Image (spheres, rainbow, N blue to C red):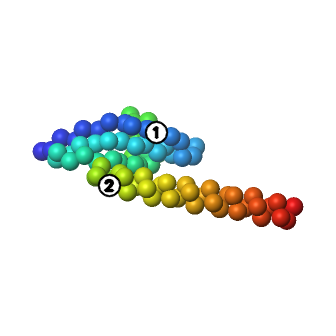
Amino acid sequence: MAETKQKLIASFSKNSVEIVRVHLQTWKAQRYVDIRVWKQARPGDGEAAVQPSYKGLTLNVELLPELRDAIDKALTEIELEDSEEVREDARNG
């Protein structure tokens, strides 16, 4: 059976009950990045304080540059939209 190795890279709160975790993992000699929403465990769910949800994305690490480019484009678009809103507010206000 293939052994999965996992290393936590980053974690941040999404809201009051969910956490986003970024793991690097190796499975069957392939390396992946797993970005997943984890939920606070409910009483009676066992010992784990948080549990992984089905909400997430697992990609081969070779695709990380493409993911980074997509995130950079999204951030640029957000900045453009925000600056347009500021200009619009200045014209109207």
Name the quadrant containing residue 24: top left
Name the residue at 45% across, 58% down. 70
- Residue 50, above or below 77: above
- Residue 62, above or below 21: below
Q: Which mark is residue 26?
A: none
Question: The C terminus appears in which quarter of the rendering?
Answer: bottom right
Is residue 15 toward the left or the right of residue 66 in the image?
right
Disc 1 to disc 2: CB gap under 8 Å? no
Question: Does the rendering let one see residue 44?
Answer: no
Dot 2 amino acid type: Leu
Dot 1 amino acid type: Ser
Residue highlighted by disc 2: 63
Q: Nearer the viewer, mark 1 or mark 2?
A: 2
Q: Earlier in the sequence, mark 1 or mark 2?
A: 1
User: How far from the left and from the top, in percent, is residue 12?
Assistant: 50, 40
Q: Which mark is residue 11?
A: 1
Q: Residues within 10 Å of mark 1 (few under 14, many from 20)?
A: some
